[in-house]
Image (tube, rainbow, N blue to C red):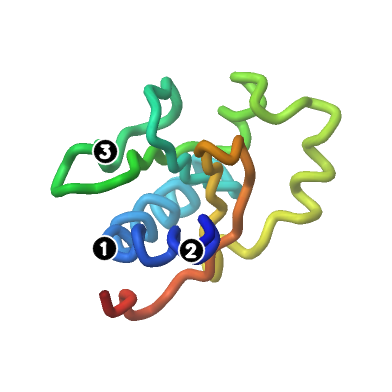
Amino acid sequence: MSLYERLPLELAPYQKMMGQAADTIMDEDVSRYPILAIHQLELELGILLVQRSDKGSKWSIHASTLEEMVTKKLVQTNRIDDFRRVYKNPREFFCLFVLSDEGAQFIFLPREDEPYDI
């Protein structure tokens, strides 16, 4: 099973919390571009939501923003407009910055009203 197939299932228990974090970032005018960093490494980014070892989670989850990603040079300044063009509606999709064995990549995962059945 590929990362794209596994990730929605593995993150399903955390969808509600991820949605609340993204909504808070937008509702509190922190940023219009919430990003959730999903990783299995040590990462100094954003606010920790889930620690990898908590409740058997395979992933750590941090809430961040485009602005922080630019400050930490994870998104180049000259690529901000390109990023904004491809960024999907954060009320409908999670923007995930995934660090895995396959490298670093941005993935847009549809937000579900109901959590996945596992």
Residue bearing the label numbered 1: 13
Q: Residue furthest left?
A: 55
The residue shown at (38%, 35%) is 40
User: On the rendered image, what quadrant is the C terminus found in?
Assistant: bottom left
Q: Tell whether 6 sits left or right of 75.
A: left
Q: Amino acid at mark 2?
A: Met
Marker disc for residue 106 = none
Measured Cα–Cα span from mark 1 to mark 3: 13 Å
In the image, residue 82 above or below residue 46: below
CA neighbours of label 3 inside 10 A, class few (<14), some (14 to 19), many (20+): some
In the image, residue 97 above or below residue 118: above
Residue bearing the label numbered 3: 52
Query: Which of the two discs, 2 and 1, sits closer to the camera?
Result: 2
CA neighbours of label 2 inside 10 A, class few (<14), some (14 to 19), many (20+): few
In the structure shown, which secondary structural element does the residue marked by tag 1 occupy?
helix
Measured Cα–Cα span from mark 2 to mark 1: 19 Å
Q: Position of residue 26 (x, y in %)?
A: 49, 51
The residue shown at (48%, 37%) is 64
How many discs mark residues in the rendered view? 3
Measured Cα–Cα span from mark 3 to mark 2: 20 Å
Q: Position of residue 100 (x, y in %)?
A: 50, 38
Q: Amino acid at mark 3?
A: Arg
Q: Position of residue 50 (x, y in %)?
A: 26, 42
Residue bearing the label numbered 2: 1
Q: Amino acid at mark 1?
A: Pro
Task: In this rendered view, identify the residue nearer to me: 91 or 18.
Answer: 18
The residue shown at (37%, 66%) is 9
